[in-house]
Image (spheres, coloured by chain):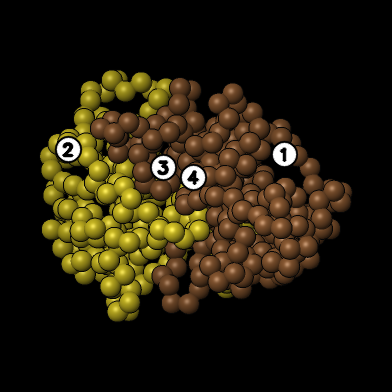
Chain colours: A yellow, B brown
Amino acid sequence: MLDKIFDSPQAALADVRDGATVLIGGFGGAGVPDELIDVLVAQGAKDLTIVNNNAGNGEIGVAALLKVGRVRKIICSYPRQVDSHHFQALYRAGKIELEIVPQGTLSERMRAAGAGIGGFYTPTGYGTDLAKGKETRVINGKGHVLESPLAGDVALVKAEKGDRWGNLVYRKSARNFGPTMATAAKCTVVQVYEIVELGALDPEVIVTPGIYVTRVVKVPRKETGNRVAGGVTQGISGRAAAGR
Amino acid sequence: MSYAKLTRDEIARRIAQDIPEGGYVNLGIGMPTLVANHLPKDREIFLHSENGILGMGPAPAKGAEDWDLINAGKEPVTLLTGGAYFHHTDSFAMMRGGHLDIAVLGAFQVSVTGDLANWSTGGDAIPAVGGAMDLAVGAKNVWVMMEHLTKEGRSKIVDRCTYPLTGVGVVKRVYTDLAVIEVTARGLMARDLVPGLAFEELQRLTGVPLLPSGVQAGAKKVSAKSV
């Protein structure tokens, strides 16, 4: 009987190794696998490469990993937030490597990894500093940049419900990077609030089919609250920047 | 003759009035989010949020926030009846694939050829791009919402951007607190100058050559169905 349910997040993350590339879901406070990240902090793996949209906020989640010095490199789209102080301190001290990737390219690179695509040409970033050193090509009159797949050793994903085969549904905008990251790692570990019987999830609405999922762990539902203070996580206020 | 600059809300209202029925629209964070407050009530307009929402509604009432339902600025929002959720890769495919009719973005600078600089001021600032470059190349119409001049009084409409580029030749139209500027094959065309502002004065403030309104420059009205 196939059962991907693990009893504890500790057991589900026991084999994460030093030097691993870890894809971590979440956008702002939504969809962040907080409990799994806490366990990764305690587990002690170091020299990690973290792939996340941001570079940690406040003291929890990715910020906690940064604070204890476990991260060698971060690949993200938007690290410049007013409460990303742990990242900023490490970056200013030259203690962390940063790779900035446009958000859609970040997501698509992981999609490519999960879909067995060896790279893709995207118009995003053409003619900008982020395309420097990259192969380019004009396709149908529009400049494109060659981007490479981005795979993880481990993905940490938050979903709403899962079953023992690893089928998942998400909740509202907490879905964000989860479904793509789940496809792009050798070992995808998912935290859910509810484990349901096989067949309980409508096959027409399953977002991530179990084939992409390695382990499922139930975590207690927290009081819904603002994990990251809304206004605090925005880009530097008063700036015209459209990015985030 | 004296003139008054538009407030941010007045610019937002002007932009909102130009968004057609049925338009799929992404509003960048910062100033462009104000446009949402001025959308005409008699039009069905679909707001897209990069983190996987179409049909995004206004902020919830105090106490009714759901932190699984946030916008690109990480603030709580609502979903309109008929709205949909999807994952990040799909969301950005919508942008790059040309499915959005309009993206309204803030900017540090826009060049005469429609180059956009809005993600970095260079120097030793920590680089952070988010979804800006994807929106810039993907939306059918990139409209910029910004103040015409910097705090120091320099034009933000420039011959060549000195800040790092977000996209090359992507901006179609600029809404400022002084005028609306169309980026056309023949150059920049200024129209809808604020009352009391003479074209010559706008030209002096802007520094780069402008065509006066009334000169046919091939600018066409945006419709949701136009390519």
Q: Secondary structure at mark 3?
A: loop
Which residue is labeled 4 in the image? B33
Q: Closer to the observer: label 1 or label 4?
A: 4
Q: Nearest the camera: B45 or A176?
A: B45
Q: Amino acid at mark 2?
A: Lys
Q: Secondary structure at mark 4?
A: helix
Of labels 1 and 4, earlier in sequence is: 4
Q: Amino acid at mark 3?
A: Asn
State whether residue B144 is above or below residue B55: below
Q: Amino acid at mark 4?
A: Thr
Which image quarter: residue B154? bottom right
Asked whether the beta carbons under mark 2 and mark 1 sit within 8 Å of each other, the answer is: no
For this orientation, the residue located farthest to the front is: B1
Neighbours of disc 4 within 10 Å: few (<14), some (14-19), many (20+): some
Asked whether the beta carbons under mark 4 and mark 3 sit within 8 Å of each other, the answer is: yes
The chain to which mark 4 is attached is B
* Residue shown at the point (82%, 55%) measured from the top left: B212
In this rendering, position of residue B207 left or right of residue B35: right
Measure the C-alpha gap from mark 2 to mark 3: 21 Å
* Residue B116 image point, x, y percent: 62, 61
In this rendering, position of residue A34 left or right of residue B214: left
The chain to which mark 3 is attached is B
State whether residue B208 is above or below residue A234: below
* Residue A17 image point, x, y percent: 23, 62
Which residue is labeled 2 in the image? A222
Q: Secondary structure at mark 1?
A: loop
Q: Amino acid at mark 1?
A: Val
The chain to which mark 2 is attached is A
Which residue is labeled 3 in the image? B71
Which residue is labeled 1 in the image? B222
Of labels 4 and 3, earlier in sequence is: 4
Which image quarter: residue B106? bottom right
